Amino acid sequence: MECMNIKGGCYCGAIRYEFEGDVTASFQCHCRECQYITGGHANPVYVLPQDKFTFVKGSPATFSRTDLTEPVKRFFCADCGTPLGSISPKRPEAFILKVGTTDEPKKWTPQFALFTCDMQPFQNLPDNVPSFEKRPQPPSQ
Ligand SMILES: [Zn+2]
Ligand SMILES: [Zn+2]
């Protein structure tokens, strides 16, 4: 995808990050888990190669559920609580960044929507992009 320079941080400013490189994907996730983090609506994210993503100020706290076999590791600001992103065992090389923490959220556009199986009646799908009940199937190798 497109090469981007993305800067951002948490609500209180204790945590700042920078990214420069090719964005792997941009999508919005409707899954039940994301609804907790967003407040109820779909979760707009960038998927970024982790090696190009750096926390340049502060260090985020992390949380992983201990009752799951393959939990997502969630990064957040311990001071203001802003969720910044996550690393999924399904995509260990990627940092999944929450668009609302970027300095210019309007630069984000979705390529697709996923986990519409968990969609709530008040959520909306973006126009003119594919949506998937679960994940898009990766191309077979
Ligand atoms: Zn903060
Ligand atoms: Zn989700």
Image: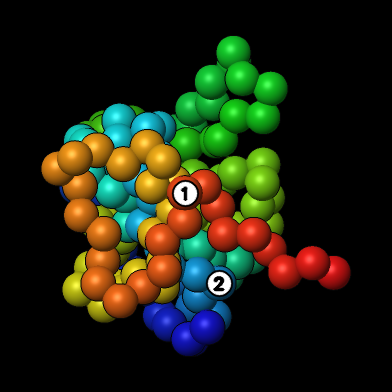
User: Type of residue at label 1?
Assistant: Glu
Query: Along the horizontal axis of the image, is 106 left or right of 132?
Result: left
Q: Is residue 89 above or below residue 106?
A: above
For the point 67% across and 29% down, the residue is 70
Coordinates of residue 74 in the picture (x, y in percent): 47, 36
Secondary structure beneath dot 1 equals: loop
Q: 55 or 62: which is nearer to us?
A: 62
**Residue at mark 2 to residue at mark 1: CA–CA distance:** 21 Å
Q: Position of residue 49 (x, y in %)?
A: 60, 66
Quadrant where the image shows the C terminus: bottom right
* Residue pictured at 54% horizontal, 26% vertical: 64
* Residue of label 1: 133
Residue lying at the far left of the rendered structure: 122
Q: Nearer the viewer, mark 2 or mark 1?
A: 1
Q: Which residue does the image show at 26% across and 66% down from the upper left?
A: 126
Instruction: Look at label 2 and name its amino acid.
Output: Thr
Q: Which residue is mark 2?
A: 24
The residue at the point 55 percent across, 52 percent down is 135
Residue 52, compared with residue 124, is above or below; it is below
Frontmost residue, 26 versus 31: 31
